[in-house]
Amino acid sequence: MTTKSLVFIPESLTTKNQIITLNHPNYEENKSDITLLLSDGSDIDEQKVYWIQENKFGKSQEGSNLTVKSTFYFKTHELQKGGIINNDSIYFSTDYDLAFSLLSHFYKTHKMDFISKDFESKFETLNDLHIGLFESNNNWKYINKNLLKKSLMKLCHSIEEDLGDTNEVFFKMTNIKLFEFFEMKIEKIAKDFPQRLLQKINNMYPALSIQSERIQEQAKYFYSLQLMASLVPFKVYEYVNDRFRTSLYPDFINYIEVDYKKTIEQIQQEEMMLKSVKSLNQGLQSNVPHESGSTKKKVKTKVVPKSKGLDSFFKVKK
């Protein structure tokens, strides 16, 4: 029995497409391979890459005890052309930057000597790099060389040499190009930052909304990098974050490590002071003499004013 799936793909795709799998760019966490949809690219020599991802509904929105087992699909104005798929998943495609897969390959094959200092990387030709990628996963043969070159330019320093009949371009990854790549990505994400995530950040740091615009913007930069952390090896993320902590979002880091810490300590001190005041009041009230049942002797007592908490405790005498 053939299992049908509902897949949303870009309208720009032609009928000639290729579906391949590559190693997940964050290979250290043993994640499953990623499924990529490649456009033909033969007409304008510009190949597009899309990442096909699954969205599994699971539980029904109508009740916690209901499970989604089927998916209905139809056209808004042509309901008769709809149908039913016997599974609870749909697949959607998003733009994928092949540079993430290249970055992962470079780290794995020790071509990032600014991180793995035990190895020394060298300049390589486009053809040599393509062969190395193919040897790691033969699906790289479906990647257009022009797309590969364009992706390499994002991460590598390049040198073009005149070899007489042809010009040969040599590539070598550098930390400068790595920082430029991530800074460009961060600025793009921050420009259209997800509002739901921004709300979660403000819930984590309630005073962030009253900080300067600079700190709020740097908070977006910081979390934009976190959104990409799952696409790169941890050492690469750590290396980039160490640099950007002092260059791209230093004020937000200072807010987290200094100002926010002070705010927490101040709240804790106020809570301790409030407990002390309450304890003092309870102690004073417990020392008030009570009338004994065996004697009718009237005992004079001193009235203790009711505490108003921290406000009265710190009230300035007029």
Image (tube, rainbow, N blue to C red):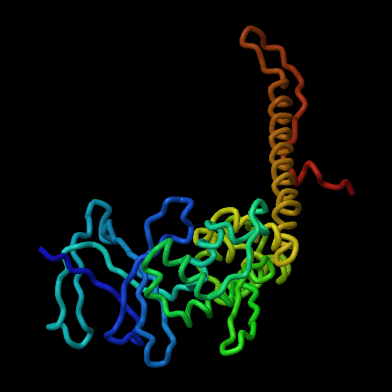
Horizontally, is 184 left or right of 132 in the view? Answer: right
Give percent across and percent down for residue 302.
77, 26
Against 267, residue 129 (above or below) is below
Against 239, residue 171 (above or below) is below
Q: Name the one closer to the observer, 135 or 30.
A: 135
Horizontally, is 53 left or right of 317 in the view? Answer: left
Give percent across and percent down for residue 188.
58, 76
Q: Name the one closer to the observer, 26 or 277.
A: 26
Residue at 60 percent of width and 58 percent of height: 236
Q: Name the one closer to the observer, 10 or 97.
A: 97
Horizontally, is 39 left or right of 278 in the view? Answer: left
Farthest residue, direction top:
294
Residue 190 visible in the displayed image:
no
Give percent across and percent down for residue 30.
42, 51
Q: Quadrant of the N terminus?
A: bottom left
Residue at 59 percent of width and 61 percent of height: 111
Against 185, residue 31 (above or below) is above
Q: How many marks?
A: 0
Horizontally, is 60 left or right of 258 in the view? Answer: left
Residue at 18 percent of width and 64 percent of height: 70
